[in-house]
Image (spheres, grey):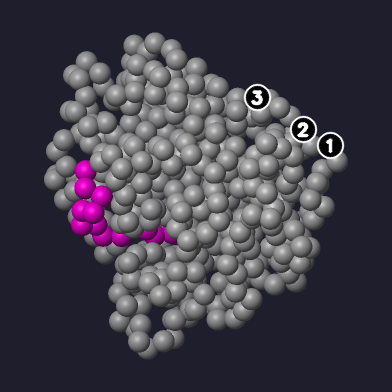
Amino acid sequence: MRFTLVLSIFASAIMSLSTHSACDAAEPDKPMNVLFLVADDLNSWLLDDADRYAGKVVAPNLRKFAASGVNFTRAYTAAPVCSPSRTAFFSGVAPWKSGIYNNAQTINKSEVVNRDDVLSLAGLFKSDGYNTFGYGKITHGWDQKEHWDDKVGHKRDPAPPGAPLAGLSGGEQDWGTIHLTEEQMNDTGGANKAIAVLEKQHDKPFFLAYGTFNPHMPWYVPKKYFDMYPLDQIVLPELKEDDLDDLPPLAKAVSDGIGSFADKVIESGQHKEAVQAYLATTTYVDTQFGRVLDALENSPYKDNTIVVFLTDHGFHLGEKHHWQKTTLWEEGTHTLLMFRAPGVSQTGGVSERFVSLMDIYPTLAELCGLTPPAYIDGRSLVPLLKDPKAPWESTAITGLCDKSKTDLAYISIRNELGRYSRYGAKEEEFYDTTKDPHEWTNQIVNPDYAATIKKLRGLVPSFAEAAHPLPSALTKKRRESRRAKAK
């Protein structure tokens, strides 16, 4: 396949050029450890890019970490939903190979990720003699449990008495002050477990993963975090009232359209309160990651531990009449990605190259001198860790499908030319992000962009190449309920 062949050529070339690993830079008797940090539903607002968000975001710990290594400001998810994103970057198999594009799919029916030769990222390190530890939300739906020496998954904190506090919806679409102490919260407990590993003496190198459930909804955090964001100082994301008018039907369906929860929030007059709650939860999460990073700094493993921080996808707060994730626009696909590799990464480096979370697996493998499985998608970021402005062909491709009607794979690519998305044979989008960073004007029928669109079409898997989405795991009753709500 043309698409696969191109990626393979690039991967081989880059691996051959990058001959010095972090392991080479460390003392021979000190193999490199890995600290793998991942946040759920945390968008890229804290990058201080006014085109993404012009308001205040209190995240001193993640900003400090970003400055200690290379901050990839143009990183994108392989799927804008928890389960397929995490399955992709942890297995090394892209959605357009596995058929896993959305949460409600039958992952155990994917012949690709369930092959005997597929090895999770934790499994790669365990097979090479590492001890593996995982605390909190790391994987979702696909996990080779035997590859962890110790693993404690995530749990949601209980809802405060009287929930829903915002009064707009039951379930997870809620926010307010939590009734627990910070020490009682589950993400705090996960950080405590990660810190305990860093405080122990280890006879073998370790792969330690810590993931937060927050800022996944509902947003329940201590009052002190809300107090950091006075309502009269909240800046709302820029919205365009007619933003859906130039979208093809399948894209409009992805957005949830008029009458969505996003519109409910805005029309209720609680948009500022919702953004405040998201920001408050963001700062709580930053605090927990800061505690783990401080523990590493104070440990004997400081100089021989590679650290990667990422978010599994982006998050909408009203843009395009949408709330949460599951879209192919910038808000849903743009992620955070930061790497620090002692002896390799450039301190204070900022890379604007368009990269993918799929690039994490081969990067960690190369940095630690491990041989990844042959099927791995993505490319090693080691050249960009050494020189953030090194030449790079965009790997920022994202896949998605409808949650209940899984007959089409939607594919998007983001690079310096803009964003191209394909939903159906005649349902496409193109945005010139150099002039339109908010992706407000779909230029797909503009003849001035015909050559650019043709080029971008050729850079994504074709209909024939892209794996068909796996069947929906939703029951017939749940599918009918969703359709009724959409009418």
Q: Name the residue located 19 percent from the left edge and 28 percent from the top edge.
A: 25
Is residue 329 found inside the magenta-colored segment of the image?
A: no
CA neighbours of label 1 inside 10 A, class few (<14), some (14 to 19), many (20+) = few
Q: Which element carries disc 2, helix, strand or loop? A: loop
Q: Is residue 484 left or right of residue 362?
A: right
Q: Is residue 119 visible from the viewing direction of this image?
A: no
The residue singled out by tag 1 in the image is: 161
Q: Name the residue located 30 percent from the left edge and 74 percent from the top edge.
A: 455
Rounded to the nearest angstrom, the CA distance separating label 2 from label 1 is: 8 Å
**The C terminus appears in which quarter of the rendering?**
bottom right
Q: Is residue 234 left or right of residue 435?
A: right
Q: Is residue 168 left or right of residue 46?
A: right
Q: Name the residue located 31 percent from the left edge and 60 percent from the top edge.
A: 394
The magenta span reads 386-402
Which amino acid, by three-letter code, is at mark 3?
Answer: Glu
Which amino acid, by three-letter code, is at mark 1?
Answer: Pro
Q: Kindly identify which numbered label has been placed on residue 183.
A: 3
Q: Depth check: give the residue in front, 266 or 155.
A: 266
Q: Depth check: give the residue in front, 330 or 459.
A: 330
**The N terminus appears in which quarter of the rendering?**
bottom left
Q: Which element carries disc 1, helix, strand or loop? A: loop
The residue singled out by tag 2 in the image is: 179
Residue 385 rendering spot, x and y as whole percentages = 26, 43
Pointer 2 or 1: first along the chain: 1
Q: Name the residue located 81 percent from the left edge and 46 percent from the top edge.
A: 164
Rounded to the nearest angstrom, the CA distance separating label 3 from label 2 is: 12 Å
Q: Is residue 462 left or right of residue 216?
A: left
